[in-house]
Image (tube, rainbow, N blue to C red):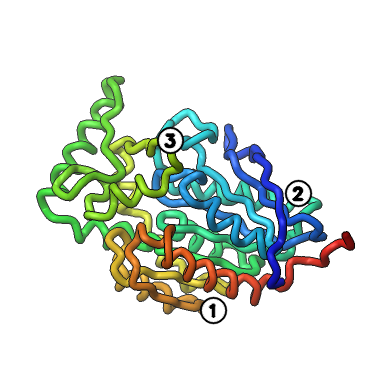
Amino acid sequence: MTSEQTYRRTTVSIPSGNSFCSAWLYLPEGVSSPPVVVLGHGMGATREMRLDAFAERFASRGIACIAFTYRNFGDSGGDRRQEIHPRQQLQDWEAVLAHVRTRTDLDSERVAVWGTSFGGGHVITIASRHPELAAAVAQCPFTDGLATALRQRPGESLRLQSLLVRDLLATVTRRAPVTLPFAAKPGGVAIMTAEDALPGYEALMPAGETFVNHTRARVIPRLASYRPGRRAKKVAPPILFCVSSTDSVAPADVTLKYAHQAPRGVVKTYDAGHFAFYLGEPFEQLVADQLAFFEEHLGLAGTADER
């Protein structure tokens, strides 16, 4: 389908674990049983942070979308606010996919997954577990926490370890959690301190809203031990890797090594930085490439009803 398709967006609540994920469902109007793309964001980000921009473009081509926010973040449920746990977030992906299978207004035989940054790493893991998926897109994916951690400066690593120890002690002594920012200016103490990290996050927030920029320090070893790129060789569905050649968060050389191991992988590189993917010309190029990939592997978005 090449013409612009109208669509409607509704908010849905999807049960996950002992809580729920809030999501936006984009349904193309006048399209019977459209294929669907499930979209998940990166570390600490919510669906308001430009997931809607991608979903709108896909929906305007007749592809249904579900853009969701992980538990513990944004307007989703969860009692460990702002805390990242890769295993729990993967459970959220599974919950959304299970929800897709229950819907009679979607084609459960034509399902794709789309993730960016930390969510791009999750997409690799999910696609390796679900050979029935029609397609997957991993955008500037986080592929190897250990490789990323080993590239930190020694002083930065020591300061993070100190925060980790303090947070673990706070848990034992039942004191207030010790937190750290997701992103800070260079020289600061945060998970990400590249020059483009903090302004990159802030640029994704809609006007009038503020990025909640903190998490518990206990997440540090979880991030370092999460290495989803190692599962790329087990990904059976066609998967498109959109890689930033100047990525300040997920090193491109590591990502490319894993990407080329995917049996049906397609690799595209872009000069834009990790956080530039969501705006301006880089966004336009990515959307065009991803739409072409989805249309190849999802087929046309169903048969338009007579109007």
Q: Are marks 1 and 3 in contact (CB under 8 Å)?
A: no
Residue tagged by mark 2?
Answer: 102
Question: Which label belongs to residue 264?
Answer: 1
Q: Hey, which quadrant is residue 249 in on the image?
A: bottom left
Q: Are marks 1 and 2 in contact (CB under 8 Å)?
A: no
State the CA–CA distance, disc 1 to disc 3. 42 Å
State the CA–CA distance, disc 1 to disc 2. 28 Å
Place of residue 75 in the rendered image (x, y in percent of width and height, measured from the top left): 53, 34
- Seen from the viewer's position, the closer of residues 142 and 226 is 142
Residue tagged by mark 3?
Answer: 208
Q: Are marks 3 and 2 in contact (CB under 8 Å)?
A: no
Q: Hey, which quadrant is residue 230 in on the image?
A: bottom left
What residue sits 74% from the left and 66% below the top?
A: 301
Q: Residue furthest toward the left?
A: 155
Instruction: Say which element carries label 2.
Output: helix
What residue sits 77% from the left and 55% below the top?
A: 29
Classed neighbour count for the residue bearing mark 1: other residues with Cα under 10 Å, few (<14), some (14–19), many (≥20): some
What residue sits 26% from the left and 50% below the top?
A: 192
Instruction: Say which element carries label 1.
Output: loop
